[in-house]
Amino acid sequence: MAVVSVFVSSTFRDFHAERDVLVGAVRERLDESLRDLGCRVEIIDLRWGVDTVGVDEEEAARRVVDVCLQQVARARPLFVGLVGDRVGYIPDGAHARWVADQAGVPADQRVEGMSVVGAG
């Protein structure tokens, strides 16, 4: 059976109830709708984290971003961004540029001070 992946992004502390609905009832309804086409839906929900045991804080941040970007690419073009009043992780300038480079953001686009939401 083919799998249709959908990446869900929001800040870590927000939208737990909404994510639960997406992972539960919404996914089940989509599965029902797609069953005759031989497909099922996979909701990619990284709110439970990425394994960063045994690495320093900088490497942990890079690992989280790397896993998130890999999963976004795998689900492309299906991305659900839940946006609220909070701002996610804001990396220092060098890390922000690294994240932007990994995501394919043009080198001339300013990224310092911007949030990296989607890490979960």
Image (cartoon, grey):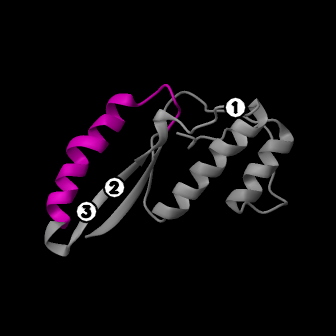
Q: Position of residue 87 (x, y in %)?
A: 61, 31
Q: Which residue is mark 3?
A: 40
Asked whether the beta carbons under mark 2 and mark 3 sit within 8 Å of each other, the answer is: yes
Q: Is residue 77 left or right of residue 1?
A: right
Q: Is residue 111 magenta?
A: no
Label 1 crowd (10 A; few <14 / some 14-19 / many >=20): few
Q: Which mark is residue 42?
A: 2
Residue 22 at what x, y percent from top left? 30, 43
On the picture, is 109 further left or further right than 38? right
Q: Which residues are magenta?
A: 10-34
Instruction: Classify 14 as above or below 99.
Output: above
2 or 1: tag closer to the N-terminus = 2
Quarter holding residue 104 = bottom right
Q: What is the x, y in percent for residue 102? A: 72, 58
User: x%, y% of residue 62?
Assistant: 72, 43
Per the image, label 3 sits on a secondary structure element best described as: strand
Residue 54 is labelled as: 1
Nearest to the observer: residue 85 or residue 103:
103
The amino acid on which the numbered mark 3 sits, given as a three-letter code, is Arg
Q: Nearer the viewer, mark 2 or mark 1?
A: 1
- Say which residue appears at 14% left-offset and 59% top-offset: 32
Whether residue 17 appears in magenta in the rendering, the answer is yes
Q: Relative to 63, is 78 on the left or the right?
A: left
Question: Tag 2: residue type?
Answer: Glu
Q: Earlier in the sequence, mark 1 or mark 3?
A: 3
Asked if residue 27 shows in the view, the reply is yes
Residue located 58% across and 37% down the image: 51
For the N terminus, the image quarter is: bottom left
